[in-house]
Amino acid sequence: MNTFMNPHFAQTHPGVGRLERVAQAVLASARFIDSARGMATLLLSAIVATLLVVANQVIDTWTDGHLLVAWTLLWVIAFSMLAIFAQPIKVFVLGVSHQWGEWKAKRHDRAQDARMWQAAQYDPRLMSEIRCAMQRAGH
């Protein structure tokens, strides 16, 4: 009597699979931070963290009797700063992101023009096309 065995083995090591999922999560968070919304969140977090550190330094100098009041005040300040500065920081980051995109596009266009001009120096057909385009544009 013949017995066939068909074992199902994993194609990848479980540790490698976990490492790949962690790498994908890190890349996804990097893409989020690269966006304008991510930058606004990061900047807002930095501002709130700075305010919390300053408030913590003030609280450390107080006596123990006022500690609960101080911590309550600290969190009220933290959440009010989040509410107050969320929209202005988002607008600021969107503006900076827009200007950064425009600067990158202009830089890319200048680099393409320089490459085209460099190629036209050695190709008379390309140079004649550039001259015709410049005449049509009125330059």
Image (cartoon, helix red, strand yellow):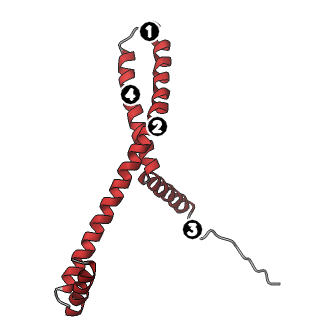
Which of disc 3 and disc 4 is earlier in sequence?
Answer: 3
In this rendering, is residue 104 above or below 135? above
Q: CA distance from mark 4 to mark 3?
A: 47 Å
At label 4, counting other C-alpha atoms closer than 10 Å, the crowd grade (few under 14, some 14-19, many 20 or more) is: some
- Image quadrant containing the C terminus: bottom left
Q: Is residue 71 left or right of residue 104?
A: right
Provide residue 82's location: percent of width, then percent of height.
47, 32
Disc 4: which residue: 51
Dot 2 and dot 1 residues touching (CB under 8 Å): no
Q: Nearer the viewer, mark 2 or mark 4?
A: 2
Between 20 and 75, the residue placed more toward the observer is 75
Give me the disc on residue 86.
Answer: 2
Q: CA distance from mark 2 to mark 3?
A: 44 Å
Which of disc 3 and disc 2 is earlier in sequence?
Answer: 3
| Helix, strand or loop for disc 2 | helix
Provide residue 28's location: percent of width, then percent of height.
49, 56
Dot 4 and dot 3 residues touching (CB under 8 Å): no
Disc 3: which residue: 12
Disc 1: which residue: 64
Between 96 and 72, the residue placed more toward the observer is 96
